[in-house]
């Protein structure tokens, strides 16, 4: 995945979109869903639903037809959850994905992308974009733009809707609370940050990831690889291979990599629910944790291990997971 500095990305997409006649046709003639990623450090503090309510009028003014608002982190919780929502959006004939990112400094970036209809949801290029210093300025800019817009969307919703969708949770049946067999017979692929492929495109719009440069990603990869190597040397006795670029399943199997280490990060209760585990006192499980699991490529099975070992510190989470791999 390629990261472009935020400001450069905004300018490039701004001139591209206006060079093509302004807002994209797929936005002006079709339904949209809006995914909001809001930094909890931004001030004034606002929940993503509050941001959605402020954004809605501006999207209507520029000719949009937003039919549902979601928190981006909920949709991009895992490739499996993402696939569930992509299927649900396809059934609703969604044509565009609107992404609103509020960063920790209060700046906001608005992106409008064509809905791909598959798990990635958004393409890697050709995305319309604009940026503002704050939400108020963004709203004013949208209303000004709206005076020049001719939309084909009619009978739009006057207030934002927050669907209580379970589309992504249906994938929980694929998670298995046990360890995979034959780890000693095949290599375990270990993707580094930025090597998630198309499924990771959506997450790149998260408030803490949007705009990272190639060099920043490379630096993080090297630091991550160093820490991973140490843990695997101590706790994993079988073969491994680090994956620094996206590789398809067929290529991995050809290289005798039938297992891939997967990493999820999100609210603990959400992660447990998405994996089909019972959640006691979900209102108390709001901490952001990292959870590792293993994907068996040839059967597309997902093994989360016999014990819950998620932790806010990825090193503790991985150590716990690798130790639990030794249990039967």
Image (spheres, grey):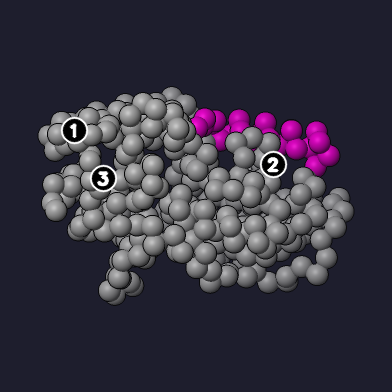
Query: Which stretch did the figure color magenta?
Result: 1-22
Q: Position of residue 63 (x, y in %)?
A: 79, 57
**Position of 228 relative to 278 (above/below):** above
Q: Residues within 10 Å of mark 3 (few under 14, many from 20)?
A: some
Q: Mark 1 and mark 3 in contact (Cβ < 8 Å)?
A: no
Report the residue that reaches farthest toward the bottom: 281
Q: Nearer the viewer, residue 268 or 304?
A: 304
Is residue 122 rendered to the left or right of residue 15? left
Disc on the earlier residue, 3 or 1? 1
Residue at screen point 48% across, 36% down: 197
Prevailing secondary structure of the magenta residues: helix
Q: Which residue is under mark 2?
A: 128
Choose top left, top right, bottom left or bottom right for residue 239: top left
Residue at screen point 84% across, 52% down: 149
> Which label is found at residue 314?
3
Secondary structure beneath label 3? helix
């Amino acid at each position: 995945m390629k990261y472009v500095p935020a400001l450069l990305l905004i300018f490039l997409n701004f001139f591209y979109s206006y060079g093509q006649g302004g807002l994209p046709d797929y936005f002006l003639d079709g339904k949209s869903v809006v995914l909001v990623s809001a930094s909890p450090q931004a001030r004034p503090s606002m929940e993503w639903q509050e941001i959605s309510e402020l954004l809605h009028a501006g999207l209507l003014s520029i000719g949009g037809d937003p039919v549902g608002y979601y928190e981006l982190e909920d949709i991009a919780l895992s490739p499996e959850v993402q696939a569930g929502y992509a299927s649900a959006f396809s059934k609703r004939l969604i044509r565009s994905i609107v992404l609103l990112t509020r960063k920790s400094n209060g700046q906001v970036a608005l992106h409008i992308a064509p809905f791909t209809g598959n798990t990635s949801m958004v393409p890697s290029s050709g995305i319309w974009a604009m940026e503002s210093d704050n939400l108020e300025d963004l709203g004013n800019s949208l209303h000004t733009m709206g005076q020049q817009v001719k939309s084909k969307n009619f009978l739009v919703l006057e207030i934002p809707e927050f669907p209580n969708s379970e589309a992504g949770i249906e994938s929980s049946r694929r998670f298995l609370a046990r360890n995979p067999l034959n780890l000693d017979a095949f290599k375990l692929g270990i993707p580094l940050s930025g090597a998630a492929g198309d499924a990771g495109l959506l997450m790149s719009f998260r408030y803490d990831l949007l705009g990272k440069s190639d060099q920043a990603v490379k630096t993080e990869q090297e630091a991550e690889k160093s820490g991973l190597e140490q843990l695997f040397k101590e706790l994993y006795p079988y073969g491994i291979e680090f994956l620094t670029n996206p590789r398809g399943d067929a290529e991995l199997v050809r290289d005798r990599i039938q297992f891939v280490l997967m990493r999820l990060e999100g609210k603990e209760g959400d992660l447990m629910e998405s994996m089909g585990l019972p959640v006691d006192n979900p209102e108390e499980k709001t901490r952001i944790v990292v959870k590792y699991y293993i994907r068996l490529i040839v059967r597309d099975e997902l093994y989360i291990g016999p014990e819950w070992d998620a932790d806010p510190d990825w090193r503790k989470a991985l150590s716990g997971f690798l130790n639990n791999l030794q249990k039967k």
